[in-house]
Image (spheres, rainbow, N blue to C red):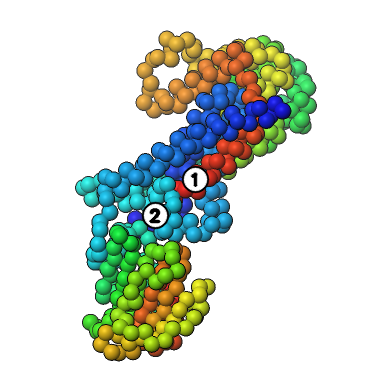
Amino acid sequence: MRFIKAVPQLILVPAAVLGAAALVLFLIGAAQDYLYPPEHGPREYASIEEAGDELGFRVVVPTYFPSYLAWPPGVIRGQLLPSSRVETVYNAPNGGYPVLVISQVVADSDELPVPLPWVREVLEERAVVIGENRGTRLTATGEDGQPLNGAYWRSGGFYFIVVTSRAASELLSIASSM
Amino acid sequence: MLFFNSFWGHYFTQAVVYSIVTLAVVETLVAAWRLREALARIKLRFLALLLPVACPPLFFLIYPPRHDFSFREQVALLDINTWLRLELGGGIAVWHLAAAGLGITAIVFLARDVLPIVRHYLGRRHLSFPIVEEGRFPRLDAALAGLPEKAAIPRPAVRLSPDKLPVAYTSGRGTLVVSAAMIDLLDDDELRAVTGHEIAHLSRRVGWISRALLVLRWLQGYNPLAILVFHLIVNDSEKLCDDMAAGYSGRRLSLTSGLLKIFQRSTGETLPEVEIRRPVKPVNGLEDVANRNLVKERIKRIVHGDAAGVPYPNFRVVVTGVMLAALLFLIV
């Protein structure tokens, strides 16, 4: 009985102190957005590291990196607002044409958050397992009519979209290595 | 900045920020609950050492998406990395200062904590001190009589320090080191009270506290806040041993006068307020002042019997720990 009488004081005091601490933390977090508002709209980055630092998340790069891709990526384009995303375009070596595009979009919903890059018309879609994630593999035609292979899936709070002009087997190797 | 985006970078910065938050909350609660009992304070303050170490891996295990960008953007109360990236001007960002802080703390930790302990274990100076056989100092034997039983430990090995100053400390497992100067300086009651304090250090309870404290301190050699918490708990441990010694000997005031005599003989100082105000020496000044203040605080506490317990101390620790963990979960 004595314990029950004491419980409110035993719980309310730490609850009040922690509530005040939470408020202070929230205000500190909000103060930064207020003092240094993040930039709106897309911009290009000079490197993967710069993009990661600016955007605040790790920009995923495939570990399977065949010789028909040049490093570093030809284009690294991203934005924080209105929705955080980054798109990296990999060209063929020696200033060649674009071969691979990877979109990494912060998203919670199951719906595809952005249009499929390079794709004019989707010809076929089928379910596929990429690493530990279930996703969708597609064949499509590009803006210039060339055949494309693509895949998209969700993982770790991101939507990943990979589109390449290379074969489907290469697409799956690249996607699985991300 | 790459380092702060890595696993260990996240871990170190989270641990430091968790220490700041936990320490602020714990010290506010110590004041709000008027916690005077040393053991209750130790338990609560241990949260400020334990949670920063344990929470990051625990959170990762129970909820891996917590590291996702969407969690940081939409759920978290505070995203530490957004502050780390902040440019202060002149090419300096917050993460430069954070890296410097972690580095300096790690160097201080190595110099002040690691090297002395390594030297101590390599040297084992106290092991070269002669063992004091029973009967050599009958007054010491009388002072020790019954104390180990009260602390539920075997009789400690007593070694004689050649120090000309009055010293008494415990070292290694079950070793009590005393100097002849201390035995000569104190009267029988004071000697029993002071040795009771040292025996308390050897007790199982205080032994566990010391070991846990050392492990948590060593795990956070990079964390400046951990140094502060460590010293607060060490001071509380001294007070806990005072309480235990007073319980063993039943002579609170003898412990006070014993402490005062040792302090005055060791430092050549007295403790009145006028003495405390003397200018601080630049080298060991802060440590001297801290030591003097601790002795003052302990004496005041023993004299006034200012150690009344609060009800349900363990429940308070558990409730605070759970609530703090919930708050820390929202800091990424």
Residue at the far left: name it. Answer: B90
Which chain is disc 1 placed on? B
Q: What residue type is labelled 1?
A: Leu
- The structure residue drawn at horizontal position 34% and vertical position 71%, both measured from the top left corner, is A114
Q: Position of residue B83 (x, y in %)?
A: 34, 48
The residue identified by callout 1 is B328
Q: In this view, does B61 lie above or below B293?
A: below
Q: In which quarter of the image is residue B210?
A: top right
Q: In this view, does B139 lie above or below B160?
A: above
Q: Where is residue B115 in the image (x, y as percent from the top left)?
A: 50, 42
Label 2: few (<14), some (14–19) or many (≥20) C-alpha neighbours in 10 Å = some
Q: Is residue B218 visible?
A: no
Of label 2 and label 1, which has the lower sequence position? 2
Q: Do the residues labelled 2 and 1 touch (CB within 8 Å)?
A: no
Q: B167 left or right of B69? A: right
Which chain is disc 2 placed on? B
Q: What element carries label 1?
A: helix
Q: Nearer the viewer, residue B260 or A103?
A: A103
Q: In which quarter of the image is residue B136?
A: top right
Q: Which amino acid does label 2 sit on?
A: Glu
- The structure residue drawn at horizontal position 61% and vertical position 33%, both measured from the top left corner, is B316
